[in-house]
Image (cartoon, rainbow, N blue to C red):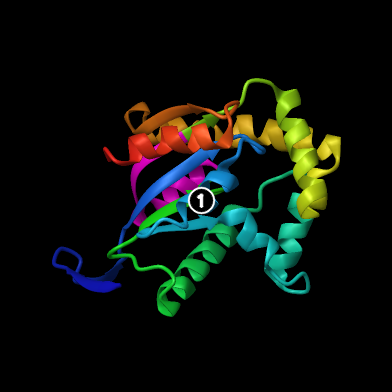
Amino acid sequence: MKAAFDVGSGTRHTRRMKYRTILLFGAPGAGKGTQGKILGTIPQFFHCACGDVFRSLKTDTAIGKIFLDYSGRGQLVPDEPTVKMWRHFIEGCTKSGRFRPKEDTLVLDGIPRNVAQAKILKHDLEVEGIFYLRCGEDEDLMHRLQRRALKENRLDDANLDVIRDRLKTYRLETKPVLEFYGKDLVTQVSADQAPAKVLSDILQKITSL
C-alpha cells in the first residue's frame, strides 16, 4: 500500500493496490464454488470464496457469531464486517505468498454480494470480467443446495425455508450488482450444463480478457 500527498488538501492518504479480478456470479447453488476451485488450480489464478472464509471462522469469535446468526436466517452478513474479514484474509494470503497480486488474477465468488459492498470494494478490485452462471428453475437450485448440504455438512443449506430466503435475498440484494458493474463486463453461462462444459465456456472467454 502506498501513501500519496494531496496538494489541494495538504493531507496524506493511502492508496490501495487494485487486484485484477474476475467475479463468479449467480444464485446460491449455481456452481460458483465448483468453478472457482477449478480455476484456482490454474497457475496465476487465486480463488477466494467468501462463504468458505466465513465458515472457517471460529464460532466463539465476534465475527464468527455474526456469521452464524445471519446465515442461519438466510440473510447476508452486514457489509462492514464482511469487507473487513475479506481484506484481512487477502492480506494474510498475500503475506504468506499464496496470493501474488502482481502476478495472479483474483477469482472471487460470494463477494461483493450487494451494491453497497461493490462500492466499498471499488478501490480494491479492478474487475476485468463477470461470469454470470444462470440456472433455469428455483427447484433445481433448491435440490442442488440440499445435495450439497448432505455432502459437505453445510447445515445452513438443508432447511427449505432458509433456502427460499437466500434466493429471495439474492434477487433483491445481490442481482443488482450486475447493473452496478455494467453489461459490458458480464458473460452469461448456462449453469444447467455439465460442470466441464461450464468450465469450458468460462475458459474460452477468460483467454480474451
Quarter of the image holding residue 14? bottom left
Can residue 156 be seen here? The reply is: no
The answer to whether residue 191 of the structure is visible from this angle is yes
Rendered location of residue 184, percent (x, y): 32, 29
118 in magenta: yes
User: Which quarter of the figure has residue 16?
Assistant: bottom left
> Does residue 139 appear to the left or right of 117 in the view shown?
right
- The quarter of the rendered structure image containing the C terminus is top left
Q: Amino acid at mark 1?
A: Ile
- Decide: is 201 above or below 119: above
Image-quadrant location for residue 26 = top right
Q: Is residue 41 left or right of residue 76?
A: left
Q: Residue furthest left?
A: 7
**Residue at x 77%, y 69% (from the top left corner):** 59
In the depicted view, which residue is nearer to us: 176 or 196? 196
Q: Residue at 65%, 61% (x, y): give it.
A: 54
Q: Residue at position x 47%, y 57% from top?
A: 41
- 56 or 5, nearer to the observer: 56
Q: Which residue is mark 1?
A: 38
What's drawn in magenta, residue-wise?
A: 114-131
Helix, strand or loop for disc 1: helix
Q: Between 38 and 58, which is closer to the camera in this rendering? A: 38
Name the quarter where the N terminus is drawn. bottom left
